[in-house]
Image: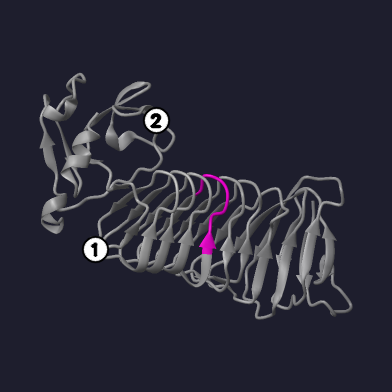
Amino acid sequence: MATYTIVLSTQTPLGPGEINAGGTITVAEGDVFIIDPSADSNTTFNDGGGGPFDFEVQVAASNSNTFNLTFQGGTNPTVDIADGVDLSNIDIAAQSADSLPMTIGDNVTLGKLDGSSAADSITIGADFTAAGDWNLGAGDDTLTAGLNADFTASKLKGELGDDVLTFGDGASFNEIDGGAGSDTLYFGDNITGAKIVGGADDDFIRIGANATISDKVDGNGGTDTLNTQTTGLTETSIETTNGVSFAAGTQILTDGGEVPVEALLPGDIVNTLDHGPQPVRWTRIALQPLETIEEGGRPVLIQKKCPWSRGAEPRPCCFAATSHFDRWAKATL
């Protein structure tokens, strides 16, 4: 385990722990590599045949140079980019890496990203800007972007795997594509974008209020569900528009008994009327004053012996809401 600083490719002499940018660096378990603002040349990290190795790459200051950071097989880099860092001309290529956990601070700009073939976990702060295309690669990836993320200069694709992509309020983008796999795409309020694509397989897309999508929301393949608080969106290949929202305190039958709906977490198994036990894919809790909800989406009280139970054991009454009454009635547990 050691700490190194990657500096200008032509710097000489080198100080203690300094490495010239460019060429290939063989990592060891626990190493830490700091990218200096002077680093200026393509740099590759490999395991020297002895990995896999976990190590860190830290960027604490902006760098105006143009180069790539490439991670080869046997490497498990954890990339940490501090607040306010501008890396507009720096691309990250991790297609061959064993994984790619990343933490990106507020007000950061980063170039192109190619994720690993495993399950990557990327957390991004507020006011992020992507200066190049982002391809998350294979694996069940998780990307969470804070307020006002800007992907207008790029296309983001989840590629293979069951990905969970979350964008906070005020996000803007060109195209977000979940790719193959059963993906969950979550967008907050006041987003602006050209196109959202679920990709192949069964996808869930949630869009908040006041969204502007200039092209369309395209489920693409599989059986896709769109849950939206914005009316008038152009939809293609969406099999179900709007799921069910339940008031806090509503009891949901799970494989471990009844639990209040607000206690459910992704991965919990709930019993459905149409398809038996199914995993929860996404949850959200929000306070919505009735006066702010369009009339067609306001809560409705489902009585204990509602006529849509289709012979099922009557459940206790609850409040549910959606803009399509017939669909939520059929989904009643």
Q: Position of residue 124 (x, y in %)?
A: 50, 60
Query: Is 271 located above or below residue 234 in the figure?
Result: above
Q: Is residue 232 left or right of residue 83?
A: left
Q: Please state if 308 lies on the left or on the right of 278 as rendered.
A: left
Could you say which quadrant of the image residue 2 lies in? bottom right
Which residue sits furthest right? 13
Q: Is residue 117 visible?
A: yes
Distance from the alpha carbon under mark 1 to that under mark 2: 30 Å
Which residue sits at x=26%, y=65%?
Answer: 210
Decide: is 244 above or below 316.
below
Disc number at residue 71?
A: none
Q: Position of residue 250 (x, y in %)?
A: 22, 32
- Residue 14 spot, x, y in % from top left: 86, 74
Label 2: element kind:
strand
Is residue 249 among the parts visible in the rendering? no
SS class of the residue under badge 1?
Answer: loop
Q: In the displayed structure, would residue 180 be above or below residue 106?
A: above
Q: Magenta span has 294?
A: no
Q: Is residue 92 above or below residue 287?
A: below
Quadrant occupied by the C terminus: top left
- Residue in the image at 20% along x and 18% along y: 313
Q: Amino acid at mark 1?
A: Gly
Q: Which residues are magenta?
A: 156-163
What's the magenta bit mostly, secondary-structure-wise?
loop
- Residue type at tag 2: Gln
Nearest the viewer among 216 and 99 is 216
Earlier in the chain: of badge 1 and badge 2, it is 1
Residue bearing the label numbered 1: 232
The residue depicted at 77 percent of the width and 55 percent of the height is: 72
Mark 1 burial class by Cα count in 10 Å: few <14, some 14-19, many 20+? few
Q: Quadrant of residue 57?
A: bottom right
The numbered dot on residue 278 is 2
